[in-house]
């Protein structure tokens, strides 16, 4: 069986805590609070040098190349090695229709 005396004491503690929170006066923000915050954000953005997007373009190109090479259909490998396609031109292609 559960001990109901412990439960009532815990409920009373929560009630007193809630009453204390309700009794606290909500402090309004100081005058011009949002203006100061906006000014601080603008100044922080001005101090930071702008990041140029063109610096990321080579990394994007390398990632795209890796994705093509690892895509599984070997599309990137066939595009890079054009001579290999001419060597394999004599071999017949496999038919997937079951014939």
Image (cartoon, rainbow, N blue to C red):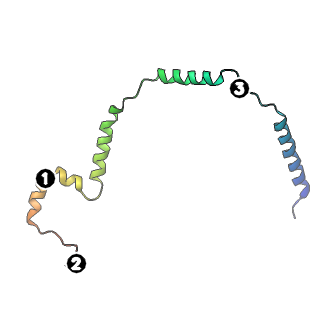
- For marks 3 and 2, the one nearer the N-term is 3
Q: Is residue 26 above or below residue 91?
A: above
In front: mark 2 or mark 1? Answer: 2
Alpha carbon distance from label 3 to label 2: 77 Å
The picture places residue 9, in percent across and down from the top left corner, at 89, 49
Secondary structure under tag 3 reads loop
- For marks 3 and 1, the one nearer the N-term is 3
Quadrant that contains the C terminus: bottom left
In front: mark 3 or mark 2? Answer: 3
Q: Would you say the residues marked 3 and 2 are in contact, meaning their CB atoms lie under 8 Å apart?
A: no
- The residue at the point 91 percent across, 55 percent down is 5
Q: Is residue 27 above or below residue 78?
A: above
- The residue at the point 83 percent across, 42 percent down is 18
Residue to which mark 3 is pinned: 29
- The residue at the point 78 percent across, 31 percent down is 26
Residue to which mark 1 is pinned: 82
Front-lying residue, 35 or 20 = 35
- For marks 2 and 1, the one nearer the N-term is 1
- The residue at the point 86 percent across, 45 percent down is 15
Alpha carbon distance from label 2 to label 1: 29 Å
């Amino acid at each position: 069986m559960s001990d109901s005396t412990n439960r009532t004491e815990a409920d009373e503690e929560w009630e007193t805590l809630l009453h204390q929170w309700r009794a606290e006066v909500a402090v309004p923000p100081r005058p011009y609070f949002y203006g100061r915050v906006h000014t601080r954000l603008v100044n922080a953005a001005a101090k930071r040098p702008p990041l140029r997007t063109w610096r990321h373009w080579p990394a994007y190109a390398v990632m795209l190349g890796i994705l093509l090479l690892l895509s599984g259909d070997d599309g990137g490998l066939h595009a890079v090695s054009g001579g290999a396609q001419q060597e394999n031109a004599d071999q017949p292609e496999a038919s997937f229709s079951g014939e």
